[in-house]
Image (tube, rainbow, N blue to C red):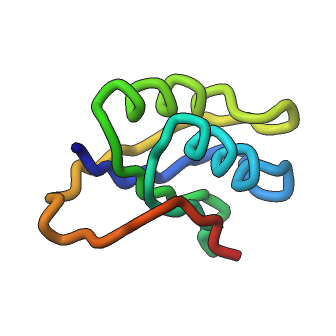
């Protein structure tokens, strides 16, 4: 299992990005969360297999129809620091 924190930049708030991301994460069996940041970015913590993380990263560059993703920053997170079960969208 791997854990990665993402900061997704571009037109990603007010376009259904979090809901879309949550659906993608659940379909891939990922754990973690997705939330809006005050900076206009979206933050996501994803925990799962390397393959599932690679897939959601690829999909996240496109996002839902009205989104315009310009950049995704990634940070590997040590698994021993985490205790997440399931995936949730934080409002």
| Nearer the observer, 77 or 32 | 32
**Rendered-image quadrant of the N terminus:** top left
- Residue 79, given in percent of the width and then of the height, sits at 17, 59
Question: On screen, 3 above or below 54?
Answer: below
In this view, 23 is above or below 62: below
The residue that appears at 67% across and 26% down in the rendered structure is: 62
Q: Nearer the viewer, residue 85 or 68?
A: 85
In the displayed structure, would residue 54 be above or below residue 4?
A: above
Front position in the image: 27 or 76: 27
Q: Quadrant of residue 74?
A: top left
Tell me which residue sits at (32%, 49%) in the image.
4
Left or right of 58? Residue 68 is right
Q: Is residue 20 left or right of residue 36?
A: right
Task: Please provide percent x and percent y for residue 75.
Answer: 28, 50
Q: Position of residue 84 (x, y in %)?
A: 37, 68
The residue lying at 29 percent from left, 72 percent from top is 83
x, y percent for residue 87 = 53, 60
Q: Residue at x 63, y 73 (%)?
A: 90
Is 43 situated left or right of 21 in this image? left
Left or right of 82? Residue 21 is right
Classify residue 52 by image quadrant. Answer: top left
């Amino acid at each position: 299992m791997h854990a990665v924190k993402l900061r997704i930049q571009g037109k990603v708030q007010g376009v259904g990005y979090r809901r879309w991301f949550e659906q993608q994460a659940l379909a891939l069996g990922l754990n973690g969360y997705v939330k809006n940041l005050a900076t206009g970015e979206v933050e996501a913590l994803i925990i799962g297999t390397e393959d599932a993380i690679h897939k959601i990263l690829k999909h996240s560059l496109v996002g839902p129809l009205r989104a315009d993703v310009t950049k995704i920053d990634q940070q590997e997170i040590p698994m021993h620091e985490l205790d997440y079960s399931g995936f949730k969208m934080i409002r």
